[in-house]
Amino acid sequence: MSLARIFSRAQVGINAPEVIVEVHLGNGLPAFHIVGLPEASVKESKDRVRSALENSQFGFPDQRITVNLAPADLPKDGGRFDLAIAVGILVASGQIVCPDIHKYEFYGELALNGEVRGVNAILPSVLAAKEQDRCCFLPLANDSLASLVNGVKRKAVSSIQEVWGDLLNQQPLPLNIEYPDCTQAPDFLLDLSDVKGQPGAKRVLEIAAAGGHNLLFLGPPGTGKSMLAQRMATIMPTMSDDEAISTAALYSIIGQSIDLTNWRQRPFRNPHHTCSAVALVGGSSNPKPGEISLAHNGVLFLDELPEFERKVLDSLREPMETGTVTISRAARQMEFPAQFQLITALNPSPTGSHTDKQATPDQVMRYLSRVSGPFIDRIDLQIELPRLTSVELQSTQPEESSAEVRARVETAYYLQLKRQGKVNARLNNKEMSVHCVLAPAELQFLARASEKLSLSPRSYHRVIKVARTISDLKCAENISLNELKEALNYRAFERLIAQLTKY
């Protein structure tokens, strides 16, 4: 009788918990059993492993084989354990003798001819193996993506025979294959200079990009709301390696390929207004990340905001505050990161414009009330875009490019990171008392404005955060009265509601 213990990793949301694959060869009638809460795809690995070993010229033990995937209460799915099970059988049967087997982890699905196929969610597994200081044997198809993680030991394999040759030191595999750094400088197809006019909206876009603030564009059709939102990613700071890897890990969970030439560019997600709450937030019986998690460290753009179902929009309220989303189901609970920057756009009336006199104030209010007050309260910047004049449309005057704006944004962004380690929009009240101190004259002005505009405590604090970002763009140390006045000016939706309720 013989026993082998092989390390692998499961996939549970953004995490990759350790799974110990225990293989026992015992006496009795030949059989092959897998225990440890395996789902159908894991149970089917019996046939894949048997065929792969036999077709790779290995002997398949004519004994009672029991494979335990520990811990037993963790559900296992997918074909990612095939390679670990096959190696466990070879070790238990004495075909592989490796005293250092506990220093390795194995992931990969086996083809019937012994080839190793790629698996999803390789980045969370590699990151977890790095913490344990273990070397990963992973599919060659996943190796270029895994190479993005610095400091991890990995060996890329294309067949079970290569694993056997390496573990017996007969044909050692190269450690940490290096790939050419194909990351390109940002080369966006879109540019802010494409947008004619709208200097106020461009100013707000710059403030939002610098401080990580949520933004609402209000205006009739054709004023450039969608064009401006689509160009937000072109003026945002480039992601750090840690941010890029955490975003890439989410995409690897859903099996979406990652372009290594632009993996540091911030994601831009634009779901249609017919999407459900599960599609937006994430879910299903086996929870998957939704649009807000796929927009992690990037932009989530919701166009035609009142056309979304109210309960769908209200499901965003907690993630907007916490930066994470927790999905609870009967079987399991998962947490996904969701530090997205929200940009919304809407027409101020069902007819397109609230000044065209085609809709009564009551009809306009009913249309706008599809968006709840608490949701609007969480949006820092609200601006109304005027219609463009024919002179502005026909203007040949060159507009400011995204690169010029991004240079100012990055200066303010790195100033915030140096001062407080995060962008202004994510400051809590305790941190605001340190980094957003107001002089007595500014405090008195803000108190009067708050009473007059009936600002909620949340809106009050958001005005201060926006003012802090405006002062950072000026490289000013303190918040002045001018910054506060400009920040208070960006409450267009609330002013429109107040104007309509006068009638």
Image (cartoon, grey):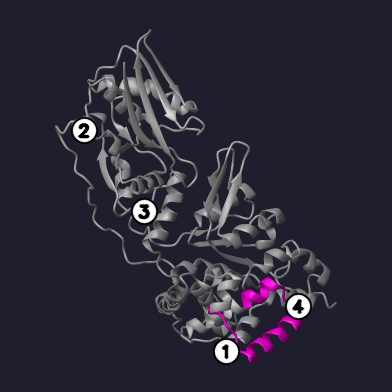
Would residue 437 appear left or right of 47 to someone viewing this image?
A: right
Q: Earlier in the sequence, mark 4 or mark 2?
A: 2
Q: Position of residue 415 (x, y in %)?
A: 43, 78
Mark 2 residue element: helix
Q: Where does label 4 land, which residue?
A: 454
The label nearer to you, 1 versus 3, is 1
Q: Where does label 2 land, which residue?
A: 167
Mark 4 vs 2: CB contact within 8 A: no
Q: Where does label 1 land, which residue?
A: 480
Q: Earlier in the sequence, mark 4 or mark 1?
A: 4
Farthest residue to the right: give it. Answer: 503
Q: Where does label 3 land, which residue?
A: 259
How far apart are the two marked residues, 2 and 3, measured between alpha carbons? 32 Å
- Point out the stretch of residues depicted in magenta: 435-463
The kind of residue tagged 2 is Leu
> Which residue is drawn at the image coordinates 19% and 43% (left, top)?
174
The kind of residue tagged 3 is Asp
How far apart are the two marked residues, 1 and 3, measured between alpha carbons? 44 Å
Q: Earlier in the sequence, mark 2 or mark 3?
A: 2
Q: Image quadrant for the N terminus?
A: top left
Would residue 497 appear left or right of 99 to someone viewing this image?
A: right
